[in-house]
Image: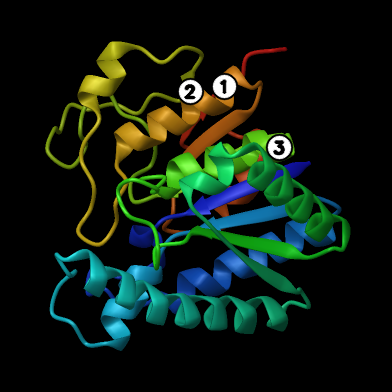
Amino acid sequence: MRLVVKAGTSTLTYSTGKANFKFIDGLCRVLSDLKNAGNEVILVSSGAIARGIDKLAFAAKPADIPTKQAAAAVGQCELMYTYDKFFSDYGQTVAQILITADDVSDDVRRTNFHNTLVRLIELGIIPVINENDTIATKEISLGDNDSLAAIVAVSVGADLMVVLSDIDGLYTGNPKTDNNAKLIPVVNEITPEMYSAAGGAGTFGTGGMSTKLQAAKMCMSSGIDMVIASGKNADVIYGAVNGEDVGTRFIGKKI
């Protein structure tokens, strides 16, 4: 299986904004194990700005773009150091790829990105991909890593994309505020009602359920299944890969 896993800021950090090393270690262990079993693994990771905020001891997420980009520059070093350390513990080599919207909208850049990504996979390397927040502004930003992960999944013809979230999947309402909200286990078609029930972004992240629905729509139209599952324990990825009832599975349309 060719697998794309997206880990958001809310799963990589605690509510304090500091790194959740227990989760990151578990994520690297599971992905390494799946790769050892013969799967091809790509990780799309948020968290650079949050790691930079922590390193620079900012009290809150910066409001101005230059400071946010400076935090991203510092945090990306921290993020990749952490991944390199934990993946190395499990015998894996990682590579960093940072991209902006221009890199996937321009034909030449998109081809180069695709070729590099495929070659890294052929070499047995786990690519760790993030948006290049150090230079991305509104005009050249992908907006969120849910969309980036879907673009990556489509680009490499993935079999499955797993989005690790701070909730268990897609609900009929916002489970944080609606006690009657129920988990939707399988989605064959995304409806307007699903968008209206989607909530906003978290404190340190940029994405929300609406961006995940957009990513799911992109994957489904390309015949790729996508699973949204809780990021409390990285072992949930095993269940998603094995087709078990975890989170919400969006069924890719057969092409």
Q: Residue at x 58, y 50 (%)?
A: 5
Label 2: element kind: helix
Q: Name the colour scheme.
A: rainbow
For the residues marked 1 and 2, what is the alpha-carbon distance in whole angstroms?
5 Å
Say whether residue 83 is visible: yes
Tell me if label 1 and label 2 are in contact, CB under 8 Å. Answer: yes
Q: Earlier in the sequence, mark 3 or mark 2?
A: 3
For the residues marked 3 and 1, what is the alpha-carbon distance in whole angstroms?
11 Å
The residue pinned by badge 2 equals 217
Q: Which mark is residue 220?
A: 1
Q: Is residue 102 left or right of residue 157?
A: left
Q: Is residue 29 left or right of residue 20?
A: right
Figure check: 154 above or below 56? above
Q: Is residue 249 left or right of residue 171?
A: right
Residue 81 in percent (x, y) is at 55, 83
Q: Amino acid at mark 1?
A: Met
Q: Residues within 10 Å of mark 2 (few under 14, many from 20)?
A: many
Residue 117 in percent (x, y) is at 73, 53
Q: Residues within 10 Å of mark 1 (few under 14, many from 20)?
A: many
Q: Residue at x 39, y 82 (%)?
A: 74
Residue 203, image quadrant: bottom left
Q: Which residue is nearer to you in this view: 78 or 161? A: 78
Q: Amino acid at mark 3?
A: Ala
For the residues marked 3 and 2, what is the alpha-carbon distance in whole angstroms?
15 Å
Say whether residue 246 is visible: no
Q: Residue at x 84, y 63 (%)?
A: 124
Residue 150, image quadrant: top right
Q: Which residue is nearer to you in this view: 148 or 136? A: 136
Residue 88 in percent (x, y) is at 71, 81
The residue pinned by badge 3 equals 158
Tell me if label 3 and label 1 are in contact, CB under 8 Å. Answer: no
Residue 143 in percent (x, y) is at 36, 45
